Image (cartoon, helix red, strand yellow):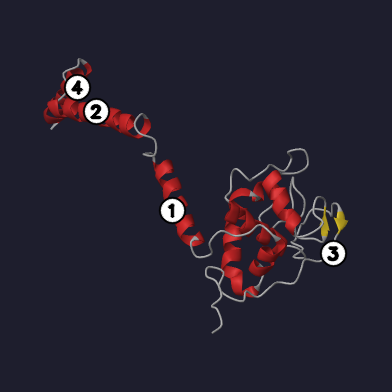
Amino acid sequence: MNTSKSQVSADNADRATTIGNGNVPWWWKVGTCATMLFAMLYFAYFHLGTPGRTAIDQFDVALARNTELQFAEIGDLQQDAETMAKFLHKSKTGWLRVGQSIFKANCVQCHGALGEGKVGPNLGDESYKNIRSIEDILSVINRGAGGAAMPAWKDKLNSNEIVLVSTYVASLRGSNPAGGKGAEGQVIPPWPAPIEPIAPLNQPAKAKP
């Protein structure tokens, strides 16, 4: 029994010595070379080749296509108070959720997940620093405010995204989220009443016979 164990130990020691001296099995060499070749080809194709091949690039393209399909339903929105009032209407809560998703992707770091305010002001009370009317939200998001404390988004979001996120910000007024930041600015007149669209926003009203 002891002789057998000694023989196994000796064989293992011989294998270790052989590998240590560079005499590795052929399949080890083939596997290593194949892995290195794959890594070089992968790097060259996805990182040194034509732009748009990385997973991030492909995700951005897919997201842009999905956004285009969504916005095809509503066309190009006007950046004005009337359009915002239409999307504040209860029949447009689905599009308001799109505005919410844009807000969550870009605004929560400064304004909080519920608009309670962090570095930026509380969006859920009745006081505003740079806003006097509902369309001013569009202007602030487009151009920024506070000496670049609030960045301009006109070159980062398309026009429809700005309308929808502005409308969502307007909808937060009076929500008074828990733990909200103290009021800043002054209380302003209420927003215009939501407008019920006469026809779906993606197609014109039918002419009367």
Q: Label 3 vs label 2: CA separation?
A: 67 Å
Q: Is residue 33 left or right of residue 65?
A: left
Looking at the rendered structure, the kind of residue marked 2 is Leu
User: Of helix, strand and loop, which one carries label 2?
Assistant: helix
In the displayed orientation, state which residue is furthest to the top. 21
Give the x, y percent position of residue 135: 73, 58
Give the x, y percent position of residue 16: 21, 22
Looking at the rendered structure, the kind of residue marked 4 is Ala
Instruction: Say few, some or many: other residues with alpha carbon within 10 Å of mark 2 (under 14 / 14 to 19 / 20 or more).
Output: few
Q: Earlier in the sequence, mark 4 or mark 3?
A: 4
On-image quarter of the C terminus: bottom right
- Residue pointed to by mark 2: 37
User: Of helix, strand and loop, which one carries label 4?
Assistant: helix
Q: Is residue 125 left or right of residue 4?
A: right
Q: Earlier in the sequence, mark 2 or mark 4?
A: 4
Q: Earlier in the sequence, mark 1 or mark 3?
A: 1
The residue at the point 66 percent across, 55 percent down is 113
User: Of helix, strand and loop, which one carries label 3?
Assistant: loop
**Are the residues at dot 2 and dot 1 in contact (C-beta closer than 8 Å)?**
no
Looking at the rendered structure, the kind of residue marked 1 is Arg
The residue at the point 17 percent across, 22 percent down is 24
Q: Earlier in the sequence, mark 4 or mark 1?
A: 4
Q: Earlier in the sequence, mark 2 or mark 1?
A: 2
- Residue pointed to by mark 3: 189
Give the x, y percent position of residue 109: 66, 47
- Residue pointed to by mark 4: 13
Q: Earlier in the sequence, mark 3 or mark 2?
A: 2
In the displayed orientation, state which residue is furthest to the right. 186
- Residue pointed to by mark 1: 65
